[in-house]
Image (spheres, rainbow, N blue to C red):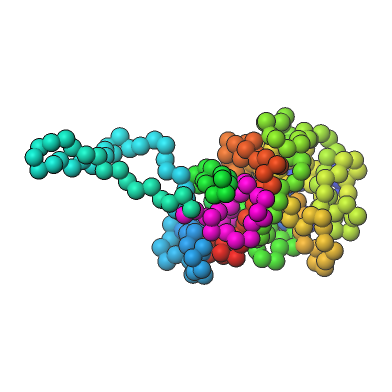
C-alpha cells in the first residue's frame, strides 16, 4: 500500500530502507510521521465488552490485559499463601485466591464468531488513535472458550484502527477475518500446520488496485503500484500469515486496501498490519490449525462488543 515509486529498482530500494527502519511495508509512507500516536499510548481496557463506549479515565503507557489474561508463571518470592489458625491451635488452613470463571474472558463474550471456529486471536487497543495493541489467543474446548495465551504486546497501524480502511492508509482495519490458506516467510518453515511458502526473489504481494490480481501473492514481474517485494522485507516478513481483509478484493473507489498480515514486529507501528515479537509470532503461527477455522478479531477494546 505504498505510493508508487515509478520503477522496480527504486521500489525495491525503498522496501529495504523501510525494513531497516523497523516498519512494515503493508501501508503508506505516512507511517514515518513523527506524530505516531502509538508512541504515547493511553491505557487499554477491555471494558468495551460490557457495552461501554468511553475509554478508561486512567491512562498508562501500555495496554492493560483483559481479565482473561493468564497470570505470570513466576510467582513473587515474597508472595505466600495466607494462613488462618484455629482457636484451639489446631492445624492451619491455606486460603487460595479465587479463580475467575472459565466463561469470563474476551472470547466468550463475542457473538459473531462462526460456530465452526475453535481458535481465536483477539487484537485490541485503547481507542482508535494508538498503534500500541494487545493480543490474546483462545481455543474452544468442549464448547467453552478458554485462554490459550496470556496478553502479548503488539503493534498495529501507525494511525491505529479504522472502520474504513483504504489503500495507502496506515491504519489497521477493524472486523473479524479468517486466516489465509498459505503462510509465508523469508526464513524456512518454523513448524506451521498451514501450507508454507519460503519466499524467493520476485515474490510480490500485488497492491496495485488496477491489476486483475490485486491483493494477492504473485511471482514474477512486479505488478506495479505499491506492490511489495516480499523477499526483501526483513525482519518483518521472516514469517507471516495473511489476514483475509478484502480477499477476494472488492472493486471500490478508493480501493479498500491490501496486504494486511500478521507478521514479525519491527521497531514501531506498522503500515496497517498486526505485528508481534518473533517468539510470540512463531508460537501463534505454529498453534494455528486450518481445521479449527481460526478467526482474528481486531478493534479498539471499547468496540469489541460489536463482534
Image-quadrant location for residue 94? top left
| Side of 259 where 78 appears, left or right | left
Write down the quadrant of residue 95 in the picture.
Answer: top left
Residue that appears at 88% across and 45% down: 222
Q: Determine if residue 149 is in view.
A: yes
Residue at the location (60% across, 36% down)? 283
Number of callouts in the render? 0
Residue at 65% across, 54% down: 115
> Where on the picture, by quarter, is residue 80?
top left
Chief secondary structure of the magenta portion: loop
Q: Position of residue 213 (x, y in %)?
A: 88, 52
Q: Is residue 157 magenta?
A: no
**Which quarter of the figure is the C terminus placed in?**
bottom right
Residue 58 horizontal side relative to residue 1, left or right:
left
Question: Does 121 sit above or below residue 250?
Answer: above
Q: Which residues are magenta?
A: 104-131
Q: Nearer the viewer, residue 227 or 55?
A: 55
Q: Residue furthest front?
A: 142
User: 53 or 307, which is in the foreground?
Assistant: 307
Residue sitting at the far left: 88
Q: Position of residue 142 (x, y in %)?
A: 56, 45
Front in this rendered view, residue 127 or 93: 93
Q: Is residue 134 above or below residue 307?
A: above
Q: Quadrant where the N terminus lies?
A: bottom right
Whether residue 287 is situated above or below residue 6 in the rendered picture: above
Amino acid at each position: 500500500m505504498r505510493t508508487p515509486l515509478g520503477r522496480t529498482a527504486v521500489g525495491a530500494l525503498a522496501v529495504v530502507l523501510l525494513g531497516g527502519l523497523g516498519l512494515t511495508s503493508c501501508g503508506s509512507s505516512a507511517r514515518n510521521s513523527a506524530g505516531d500516536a502509538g508512541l504515547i499510548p493511553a491505557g487499554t481496557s477491555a471494558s468495551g465488552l460490557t457495552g461501554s463506549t468511553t475509554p478508561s479515565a486512567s491512562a498508562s503507557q501500555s495496554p492493560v490485559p483483559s481479565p482473561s489474561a493468564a497470570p505470570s508463571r513466576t510467582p513473587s518470592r515474597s508472595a505466600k499463601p495466607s494462613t488462618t489458625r484455629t482457636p484451639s491451635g489446631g492445624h492451619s488452613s491455606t486460603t487460595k485466591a479465587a479463580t475467575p470463571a472459565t466463561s469470563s474472558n474476551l472470547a466468550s463474550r463475542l457473538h459473531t464468531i462462526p460456530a465452526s471456529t475453535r481458535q481465536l486471536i483477539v487484537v485490541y487497543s485503547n481507542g482508535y488513535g494508538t498503534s500500541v495493541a494487545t493480543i490474546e489467543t483462545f481455543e474452544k474446548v468442549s464448547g467453552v472458550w478458554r485462554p490459550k495465551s496470556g496478553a502479548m504486546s503488539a503493534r498495529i497501524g501507525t494511525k491505529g484502527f479504522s472502520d474504513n480502511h483504504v489503500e495507502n492508509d496506515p491504519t489497521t482495519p477493524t472486523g473479524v477475518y479468517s486466516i489465509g490458506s498459505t503462510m509465508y516467510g523469508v526464513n524456512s518453515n518454523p513448524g506451521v500446520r498451514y501450507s508454507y511458502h519460503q519466499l524467493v526473489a520476485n515474490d510480490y504481494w500485488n497492491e496495485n488496485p488496477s491489476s486483475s490480481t490485486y491483493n494477492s501473492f504473485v511471482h514474477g514481474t512486479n505488478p506495479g503500484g505499491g506492490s511489495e517485494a516480499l523477499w526483501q522485507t526483513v525482519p518483518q516478513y521472516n514469517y507471516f500469515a495473511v489476514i483475509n481483509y478484502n480477499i477476494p478484493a472488492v472493486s471500490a473507489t478508493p480501493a479498500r486496501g491490501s496486504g494486511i498480515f500478521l507478521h514479525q514486529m519491527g521497531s514501531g507501528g506498522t503500515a496497517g498490519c498486526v505485528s508481534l515479537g518473533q517468539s510470540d509470532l512463531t508460537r501463534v503461527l505454529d498453534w494455528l490449525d486450518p481445521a479449527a477455522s481460526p478467526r482474528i478479531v481486531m478493534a479498539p477494546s471499547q468496540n469489541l462488543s460489536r463482534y
